[in-house]
Image (cartoon, rainbow, N blue to C red):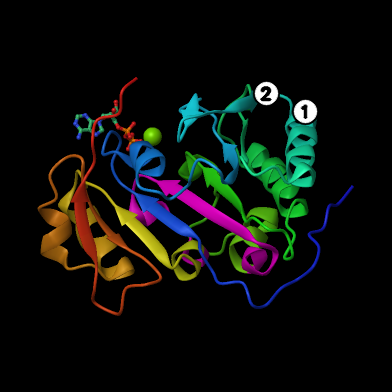
């Protein structure tokens, strides 16, 4: 069975995010804290390590079964409740290309360019799930290249810039960069994402650089995360 999104809408703007930082730099915290997703958003998560018990004060409903995840997601999309939802797929065998692709097919099929709310799609541990650093392929690639028109907004999380397929770099208008552990990685990221090299090299832990759709060329913001209560 192949699911297809509906109601292509060219007026929607691209709103994908690329999140890159070393382990422990605050990537997951940034997603929870910086308004990248909101309390009343509709959010699907690929969450192999179960990093999200709650998100923006809302419980995350977690499924190990793809079929149950799909049912919950489609029911949530159809219900159109004002409070939104947070629904995670956490496959038992973890972050694999096969699991990401299975998740992506469901999410792609939940796209609807006339839906009142976008579907935000948080994807953790992507380096383990993408097989080349060139083109992103399959349904995962479709979300990145064609998702905009169907209200799909991807949030793609990686540890190092070198792991990120070029399709993702090219399609994410919004970027978050946390501390890098190696100078080489900082240099690579500054070239690929167009941040000043020195700004990335000198980032302390929990500090970040951010660039969104609203910034002009060369502009960016910086900030520091708060520790979340656990
Ligand atoms: N400003 C901060 N001060 C202290 N600890 C923090 C701060 N920001 C985040 N943390 C903590 O650091 C840990 C790692 O953050 P996390 O977001 O999980 O990193 P990543 O997803 O990049 O591996 C978490 O336990 C988080 O609560
Ligand atoms: Mg994390």
Q: Position of residue 208 (x, y in %)?
A: 23, 51
Residue 72 falls left or right of residue 117? right
The image quadrant that residue 181 belongs to is top left
Q: Quadrant of ligand 2?
A: top left
Q: Nearer the viewer, residue 76 or 3?
A: 76
Query: Horizontal placement of 28 versus 156: left or right?
Result: left
Q: Position of residue 77 (x, y in %)?
A: 74, 45
Q: Is residue 23 above or below residue 78?
A: above
Q: Position of residue 210 (x, y in %)?
A: 29, 59
Q: Quadrant of residue 25?
A: top left
Local crowd size for mark 1, using a 10 Å CA cut-off: few (<14), some (14–19), many (≥20): few
The alpha-carbon separation of the residues under discs 1 and 2 comes to: 8 Å
**Circle 1 is placed at which residue position?**
68
Q: Which residues are magenta?
A: 146-167
Q: Residue at x 70, y 48 (%)?
A: 107
Residue 123, position in %: x, y? Answer: 53, 43
State the count of labels.
2
The residue that mark 2 highlights is: 64
Residue 52 showing in the rendered view: no
**Quadrant of the rendering where the C terminus is positioned:** top left
Left or right: where 6 falls relative to 218: right
Left or right: 183 in relation to 87: left
């Amino acid at each position: 069975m192949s699911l297809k999104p509906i109601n292509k809408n060219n007026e929607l703007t691209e709103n994908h995010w690329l999140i890159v930082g070393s382990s422990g730099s605050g990537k997951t915290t940034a997603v929870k804290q910086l308004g990248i997703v909101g309390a009343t958003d509709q959010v699907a998560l690929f969450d192999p390590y179960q990093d999200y018990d709650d998100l923006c004060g809302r419980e995350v409903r977690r499924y190990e079964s793809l079929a149950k995840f799909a049912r919950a997601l489609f029911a949530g999309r159809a219900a159109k409740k004002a409070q939104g939802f947070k629904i995670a797929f956490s496959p038992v065998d973890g972050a694999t290309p096969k699991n990401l692709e299975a998740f992506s097919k469901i999410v792609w099929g939940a796209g609807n360019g006339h839906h009142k709310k976008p579907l935000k799609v948080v994807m953790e541990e992507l380096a383990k799930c993408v097989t080349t650093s060139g083109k992103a392929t399959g349904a995962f690639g479709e979300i990145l290249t064609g998702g905009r028109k169907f209200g799909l907004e991807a949030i793609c999380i990686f540890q190092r810039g070198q792991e990120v397929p070029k399709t993702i770099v090219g399609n994410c208008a919004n970027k978050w960069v946390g501390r890098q552990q190696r100078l080489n990685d900082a240099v690579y990221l500054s070239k690929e994402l167009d941040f000043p090299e020195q700004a990335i090299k000198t980032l302390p832990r929990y500090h970040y650089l951010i660039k969104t759709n609203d910034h002009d060329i060369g502009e960016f913001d910086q900030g520091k995360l708060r520790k979340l209560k656990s």
